[in-house]
Amino acid sequence: MRERIKRCIDILPGWASCQIFHVLRLITSSDYRTRLRFESAAFARMGKPQLVQAGLFEGMRFPRTFGSQGGYISKVEGVYELPVQAALRELFQKPVSCFIDIGAAEGYYAVGMAKLFPALKVIAFELEKCLQHTMRCLARDNGVSNIEIRGRCGREQLQRLTSSENTVILCDVEGYEDFLLEPESIPKLRSCSIVVELHEEYAPGITERLRRRFSSTHMCRVVQQSDTTDQNANFRGSVPAYVREGRRNSGEWMILLPKCRRA
């Protein structure tokens, strides 16, 4: 039944699917209702900012919308997923020709990087039609045109897109990384820089499998979400961590740097 409802929503225009998805989540998810309640209160205390306040995407327009994937408070404060922001800062110290965001949600990273680097080619993959619509609106609000929004990302698409050695991939796909990030099937991954969120709960053993797959071609390190976000958030005392970050677990990411590029 859930999949049937989702298929019906997906055939609607983006704005309509966003509204219906929001109403359904209000009805079915107590976590979603709690998040909206805390977000609304914190947003009002912040003065209802329309721009990201700090961090890598400081100054990016990021209006609050029900199409958001969560973690809005941390995103607008600029402290969302600080390990990912730090990794992107590091990777973009050298020339990058293409940025691929797989699981782009509402486009926080995809639009943010497109805005920071107007000459950069950005390709954003996102399955949810509602979030694709929100991403297009975010790109429009920020005057961004160097972004291409697509649906599902498969191995064939990724192989075609990773032709440049100066490609950076950001991947957050709830365990699908186990299938997708396979250099034996996608040889061009061996020359890409990759930041991937690890989902051991969906793909047990994924951390070690990715280490083995890329051990001969990449320098590998794993970073965790520290309490840095808590130390910097303006409303850490009144907003639960899972509301700020949009997650109940502490995030963990693997950063894969090609040895050839590092040299």
Image: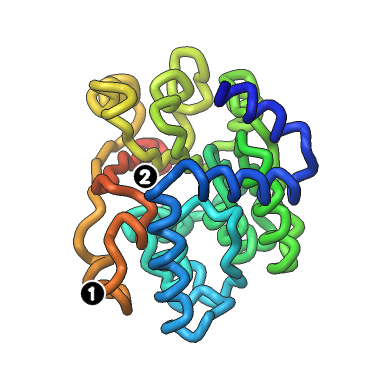
In the image, what residue occupies the spot 55% across and 46% down? Answer: 105
In the picture provided, is 224 more to the left or to the right than 90? left
Q: Amino acid at mark 2?
A: Arg
In the picture provided, is 108 more to the left or to the right than 173? right
Q: Amino acid at mark 1?
A: Gly
Task: Give the quadrant of residue 111.
Answer: bottom right
The image position of residue 10, as x and y in percent, is: 71, 33
Q: Is residue 251 above or below residue 235?
A: above
Task: Please state, as top left, top right, bottom left or bottom right, where the C terminus lies in the image.
Answer: top left
Query: Which mark identifies residue 100?
Result: none
Query: Which mark identifies residue 262?
Result: 2
Q: Is residue 205 above or below residue 165?
A: above
Query: Is label 1 in a helix, a strand or a loop?
Result: loop
Of all residues, the one furthest to the top in this rendering is: 184
In the image, what residue occupies the spot 60% across and 38% down? Answer: 126
In the picture provided, is 228 more to the left or to the right than 183? left
Residue corresponding to mark 1: 237
In the image, what residue occupies the spot 35% across and 28% down? Answer: 217
In the picture provided, is 201 more to the left or to the right than 183? left
The image position of residue 168, as x and y in percent, is: 51, 43
In the image, what residue occupies the spot 39% across and 48% down? Answer: 30
Q: Is residue 195 above or below residue 82?
A: above
Separation (CA) of disc 1 from disc 2: 41 Å
Compare residues 71 and 193 and report the one nearer the observer: 71
